[in-house]
Image: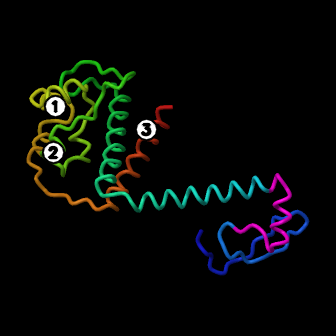
Amino acid sequence: MSLLKPSKPKKCRAPGCGKPFHPTMSTQKVCSIACARAIAKDPKLQKVAAKAITKQKRQDLQERREKLKTKGEHLREAQAAFNAYIRERDRLAGYACISSGRPLDWNGNAVDAGHYRSTGAAPHLRFDENNCHAQSKHDNRYLSGNVAEYRLGLIQRIGLAAVEALEADQAPRRYTIEDLQAIKATYRQKLRDLKRAAA
C-alpha cells in the first residue's frame, strides 16, 4: 500500500462519525482506532472495507506482474492483440483465406493471422497491417504460409505497388517494452472499436 502525500481530507466512514481526516494510507477509511473498531462491528461496512482492500491488492499484484514481464512476454502479448485485430478486421470484411481463396471457418479455431513476410524472416513487419491477413490454419501452418498463392491474393487485395513496397522494406525496427505496451493497447482498442461498430 502506498503512502499518500498530504491531500484534501476524507470523511470518516465509521457509523455516526463522518469527521474529516487526513489519511496516511490510500486504503484508510476511518479517522481513528475507535472508528476502526466501530466498522469492525458493522458487517455492512466490513464488506465495503474488504472490497477496497481487495481491489488495491489486485492492482498492486497486477503492477508487480507487469514489472516482472520480460520483453519476450510483452512481444507475445502485443502480437496476440495485433493478430486478434487482424482476424476480426478480415472477418467483418467477409474475406476468404488470403492464400487459397476458400471461405474461412470463423466458428472454430481454424483461422490464423498469417504474415506474408514471416515474423522470422522479417520481424520488422510483424505489426504491419498490409503484411498480415486472415488465413486458414492449414495454409499458414502446414503449407508454410502458401506464399506464392498468398502473393497473388495480396496483389488483388492491396495492389502490386503495396506488395512490392512490403517486399522491398528492409528498414529495421527496434521495439522497446514501452513500444510493445503501446502496440498492445492500440490494437486492443482498435479491436474494441471494430466490435462496437459491428454491433
Q: Are marks 3 and 2 in contact (CB under 8 Å)?
A: no
Residue labelled with disc 3: 194
Residue labelled with disc 2: 120
**In front: 45, or 86?**
45
* Magenta stretch: includes residue 183: no
Specify the amino acid type for callout 3: Leu
Marks 1 and 2 sit apart, C-alpha to C-alpha, by 12 Å
Q: Is residue 117 left or right of residue 111?
A: left
Residue at image x 19%, y 58%?
A: 173
Q: Position of residue 161 (x, y in %)?
A: 12, 41
| Helix, strand or loop at mark 1 | loop
Q: Of marks 1 and 2, which one's residue comes earlier in the chain?
A: 2
Q: Of marks 3 and 2, which one's residue comes earlier in the chain?
A: 2
Q: Position of residue 20 (x, y in %)?
A: 81, 75
Specify the amino acid type for callout 2: Gly
Q: Of marks 1 and 3, which one's residue comes earlier in the chain?
A: 1
Q: Position of residue 75 (x, y in %)?
A: 30, 52
Q: Quadrant of the N terminus?
A: bottom right
Residue at image x 54%, y 61%?
A: 60
Residue at image x 17%, y 32%?
A: 154
**In front: 38, or 62?**
38
| Helix, strand or loop at mark 2 | loop
Marks 1 and 3 sit apart, C-alpha to C-alpha, by 26 Å
- For the record, the magenta segment spans 28-45
Q: Position of residue 114 (x, y in %)?
A: 23, 34
Residue placed farthest to the right in the image? Answer: 16
Query: Mark 2 Cα within 10 Å, few/some/many (few <14, many 20+)?
Result: few
Specify the amino acid type for callout 1: Gly
Residue placed farthest to the bottom in the image? Answer: 6
Q: Which mark is residue 145?
A: 1
Q: Are marks 1 and 3 in contact (CB under 8 Å)?
A: no
Query: Mark 1 Cα within 10 Å, few/some/many (few <14, many 20+)?
Result: many
